Image (cartoon, rainbow, N blue to C red):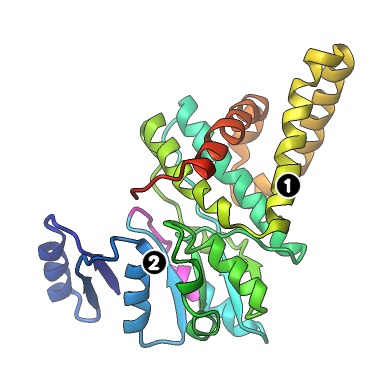
Amino acid sequence: MIVDDGSSDATPKILERWRRRIPRLRVVRREEDAAGGNKKRAMEAGIAAASHALLAFTDADCEPPPAWLETLAGLHASYARPSVLVGYSPFRSSGNSLLALAARYETFVTGVLTAGAAGLGIPYMAVGRNLSYPASVFEVVGGFRPIMHSMSGDDDLFVQEVVRRSAAVVRAVMDPASFVPTQAPTTWRAWLRQKRRHASAGRFYSARSQAALALFHGSNIIVWIAPVFLGWMGAALLGTRLAVQFAALRSAAHRLGEETLLPVQPLMEAIYLLYTTLAAPSAMLFAPRRW
């Protein structure tokens, strides 16, 4: 199924040609209304038209692998309780430019934190371009109504609502057959705009999630500025943190196929620090109004 969210270009004609070639393809057209073009409204239209018990979501700029749906369906069937399956969606490698590496690294670290939190039983995050759950879970939490006030959040805020209502178990999926690659941004401006949109949902995170993230990123900032105030002791503290982090990320990099990021970890951490210090807080204070 494809939801056309009030597009004004050639999308309807293209989808009609696809529908003629693929009889099983269903196209849902959502006309623009006074409520605006909130992505969650388009998703609700697609979910309402769905005829199967399991839902799986990805984005238009993604290319799910051939076994994606089969893998997700098999995992759903293997669990006794309803589950929200949070998958990994890496950026395609578009060379070794600083932008490509920075975008990949941020996505990698976010994926590690997401999987780690789910494994510890305190999930707070998901990625909407690789997400799956039963339609019954969507109904139990009231759909997207509780989180419609946020432009983004169909993934992370939805997961937090599921946790709050104990509607399902949130599980991270680490099977490579389930990874959904997506196109990396081509400019710093495009990447920062995307990340600001994602980070804007952080304003509505639970107090526990906000506190944990503030502690994690705040301690990172303190360690990075420690050499300025503590000299060689601060430098030793920073070096120790990077070494411990490298050891922790090495295993995850092998599982997620991101080994090429390990040699540039210190540089990528510096860029990641700038993002979490500047871009993310500004998005929470001044949320973007357009998708």
Inspect the image, locate mark 2, and give the three-letter code of the amino acid beneath it: Lys
Question: Which residue does the image show at 78% across and 39% down from the upper left?
Answer: 247
Magenta residue check for 68:
yes
Do we see residue 62 in this rendering?
yes
Classed neighbour count for the residue bearing mark 1: other residues with Cα under 10 Å, few (<14), some (14–19), many (≥20): few
Q: How many marks?
A: 2
Q: Quadrant of residue 208?
A: bottom right
Looking at the image, which is closer to me, 35 or 264?
35
Magenta residue check for 246:
no
Horizontally, is 233 left or right of 54 in the view?
right
- Residue 227 placed where, x, y %? 80, 16
Give the numbered dot on residue 251. Answer: 1
Q: Which residue is mark 2?
A: 40
Classed neighbour count for the residue bearing mark 2: other residues with Cα under 10 Å, few (<14), some (14–19), many (≥20): many
Callout 1–callout 2 Cβ contact below 8 Å: no
- Residue 29 placed where, x, y %? 20, 72
- Residue 228 placed where, x, y %? 78, 13
Write down the region rendered in magenta.
61-71
Inspect the image, locate mark 1, and give the three-letter code of the amino acid beneath it: Ser
Helix, strand or loop at label 1? It is: helix
Question: Which residue does the image show at 36% across and 34% down from the upper left?
Answer: 186
Residue that extends furthest to the right in the rendered view of this protein: 233
Horizontally, is 160 left or right of 58 in the view?
right
Q: Quadrant of residue 81?
A: bottom right
Mark 1 vs mark 2: in front: 2
Give the numbered dot on residue 164. Answer: none
Question: Which residue does the image show at 36% across and 88% down from the upper left?
Answer: 51
Helix, strand or loop at label 2? It is: helix
Looking at the image, which is closer to me, 286 or 161?
286
